[in-house]
Image: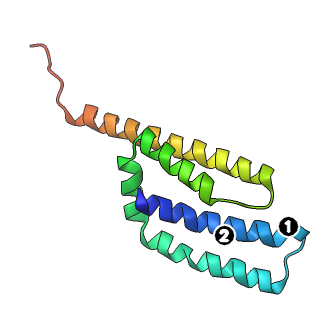
Amino acid sequence: MNNLHNGLSKVLSTITQVAKAYEDKKIIWSEWLKIGATVIGWIWLFKHLTEIKADIDTATEQSMSAMMEQIKVEFDIPQDALEETIEQALSIILTILTMVGKKVEMFALNNVIPKNKAA
Protein backbone atom coordinates (compact mmCIF):
# COMPACT_ATOMS: atom_id res chain seq x y z
CA MET A 1 0.00 0.00 0.00
CA ASN A 2 3.04 2.23 0.33
CA ASN A 3 3.34 2.87 -3.41
CA LEU A 4 -0.33 3.72 -3.73
CA HIS A 5 -0.11 6.05 -0.75
CA ASN A 6 2.97 7.79 -2.19
CA GLY A 7 1.29 8.22 -5.57
CA LEU A 8 -1.86 9.68 -4.06
CA SER A 9 0.24 11.98 -1.88
CA LYS A 10 1.98 13.38 -4.96
CA VAL A 11 -1.33 14.09 -6.70
CA LEU A 12 -2.81 15.63 -3.56
CA SER A 13 0.31 17.75 -3.13
CA THR A 14 -0.39 19.35 -6.51
CA ILE A 15 -4.04 19.88 -5.60
CA THR A 16 -2.96 21.48 -2.33
CA GLN A 17 -0.56 23.82 -4.08
CA VAL A 18 -3.22 24.86 -6.62
CA ALA A 19 -5.78 25.45 -3.86
CA LYS A 20 -3.37 27.58 -1.85
CA ALA A 21 -2.33 29.57 -4.91
CA TYR A 22 -5.95 30.19 -5.95
CA GLU A 23 -7.07 31.21 -2.47
CA ASP A 24 -6.86 34.90 -3.50
CA LYS A 25 -8.65 34.12 -6.83
CA LYS A 26 -5.49 34.62 -8.92
CA ILE A 27 -2.32 32.67 -9.54
CA ILE A 28 0.91 34.61 -10.03
CA TRP A 29 4.04 33.34 -11.81
CA SER A 30 5.83 32.28 -8.61
CA GLU A 31 2.80 30.20 -7.63
CA TRP A 32 2.84 28.58 -11.07
CA LEU A 33 6.46 27.60 -10.40
CA LYS A 34 5.47 25.97 -7.12
CA ILE A 35 2.65 24.11 -8.84
CA GLY A 36 5.04 22.98 -11.57
CA ALA A 37 7.49 21.70 -8.96
CA THR A 38 4.80 19.43 -7.52
CA VAL A 39 3.87 18.16 -10.97
CA ILE A 40 7.47 17.09 -11.52
CA GLY A 41 6.89 14.65 -8.66
CA TRP A 42 4.34 12.90 -10.87
CA ILE A 43 7.25 11.37 -12.81
CA TRP A 44 7.65 9.02 -9.85
CA LEU A 45 3.98 8.15 -10.16
CA PHE A 46 4.28 7.08 -13.80
CA LYS A 47 7.51 5.17 -13.17
CA HIS A 48 5.81 3.12 -10.45
CA LEU A 49 2.43 2.37 -12.03
CA THR A 50 3.10 -1.38 -11.93
CA GLU A 51 3.78 -1.29 -8.19
CA ILE A 52 0.75 0.93 -7.60
CA LYS A 53 -1.45 -1.50 -9.51
CA ALA A 54 -0.04 -4.36 -7.41
CA ASP A 55 -0.98 -2.42 -4.26
CA ILE A 56 -4.52 -1.99 -5.58
CA ASP A 57 -4.77 -5.66 -6.54
CA THR A 58 -3.71 -6.84 -3.08
CA ALA A 59 -5.66 -4.22 -1.13
CA THR A 60 -8.41 -5.11 1.27
CA GLU A 61 -11.26 -2.87 2.30
CA GLN A 62 -9.64 -2.50 5.71
CA SER A 63 -6.24 -1.48 4.31
CA MET A 64 -7.87 1.02 1.93
CA SER A 65 -9.91 2.50 4.78
CA ALA A 66 -6.81 2.83 6.95
CA MET A 67 -4.87 4.48 4.14
CA MET A 68 -7.77 6.84 3.41
CA GLU A 69 -7.91 7.91 7.05
CA GLN A 70 -4.18 8.61 6.97
CA ILE A 71 -4.54 10.64 3.76
CA LYS A 72 -7.39 12.66 5.30
CA VAL A 73 -5.07 13.65 8.14
CA GLU A 74 -2.24 14.61 5.76
CA PHE A 75 -4.37 16.45 3.16
CA ASP A 76 -5.25 19.99 4.14
CA ILE A 77 -6.28 22.91 1.94
CA PRO A 78 -7.75 26.29 2.88
CA GLN A 79 -11.10 25.55 1.22
CA ASP A 80 -12.71 23.10 3.66
CA ALA A 81 -15.71 22.31 1.46
CA LEU A 82 -13.45 21.47 -1.49
CA GLU A 83 -11.21 19.41 0.79
CA GLU A 84 -14.17 17.36 2.00
CA THR A 85 -15.43 16.83 -1.55
CA ILE A 86 -12.02 15.65 -2.74
CA GLU A 87 -11.66 13.30 0.22
CA GLN A 88 -15.12 11.82 -0.37
CA ALA A 89 -14.46 11.36 -4.09
CA LEU A 90 -11.10 9.72 -3.39
CA SER A 91 -12.67 7.40 -0.84
CA ILE A 92 -15.33 6.32 -3.33
CA ILE A 93 -12.76 5.77 -6.08
CA LEU A 94 -10.56 3.66 -3.80
CA THR A 95 -13.55 1.59 -2.68
CA ILE A 96 -14.57 0.97 -6.29
CA LEU A 97 -11.01 0.02 -7.26
CA THR A 98 -10.88 -2.48 -4.43
CA MET A 99 -14.26 -3.98 -5.35
CA VAL A 100 -13.52 -4.13 -9.08
CA GLY A 101 -10.15 -5.74 -8.40
CA LYS A 102 -11.80 -8.49 -6.36
CA LYS A 103 -14.50 -9.09 -8.99
CA VAL A 104 -11.91 -9.37 -11.77
CA GLU A 105 -9.98 -11.81 -9.59
CA MET A 106 -13.11 -13.92 -8.99
CA PHE A 107 -14.01 -13.81 -12.71
CA ALA A 108 -10.53 -15.02 -13.61
CA LEU A 109 -10.77 -17.88 -11.09
CA ASN A 110 -14.17 -18.93 -12.45
CA ASN A 111 -12.78 -19.12 -15.96
CA VAL A 112 -9.60 -20.98 -14.97
CA ILE A 113 -11.11 -23.63 -12.71
CA PRO A 114 -12.68 -26.35 -14.86
CA LYS A 115 -16.32 -27.07 -14.24
CA ASN A 116 -17.47 -30.65 -13.73
CA LYS A 117 -19.53 -31.69 -16.69
CA ALA A 118 -22.20 -34.31 -16.33
CA ALA A 119 -21.49 -37.33 -18.55
Question: Quadrant location of residue 51?
Answer: bottom left
Report the Cα–Cα distance between label 1 and label 2.
14 Å
Q: Count neighbours of disc 2 (C-alpha within 10 A) and say few if under 14, some if 14 to 19, many if 20 or more.
A: many
> Does residue 94 sit above or below 31 in this rendering?
above
The kind of residue on which mark 1 rests is Glu
- Quarter holding the N terminus is bottom left
> Residue 45, position in %: x, y?
49, 69
> Does residue 89 sit above or below 54 in this rendering?
above
Circle 2: element type: helix
Query: Which residue corresponds to mark 2?
Result: 14
Comparing 112 with 40, the one in front is: 40
Residue drawn at 17 percent across, 29 percent down: 114
Circle 1: element type: helix
Question: Quadrant location of residue 20?
Answer: bottom right
Residue drawn at 90 percent across, 70 percent down: 24
Query: Which residue corresponds to mark 1?
Result: 23
Which mark is nearer the camera, 1 or 2?
1
Left or right, 35 with respect to 29, comes to left
Left or right, 6 with respect to 12, comes to left
Q: Earlier in the sequence, mark 1 or mark 2?
A: 2
> Does residue 3 sit above or below 110 in this rendering?
below
Residue drawn at 63 percent across, 63 percent down: 12
Residue drawn at 55 percent across, 61 percent down: 8
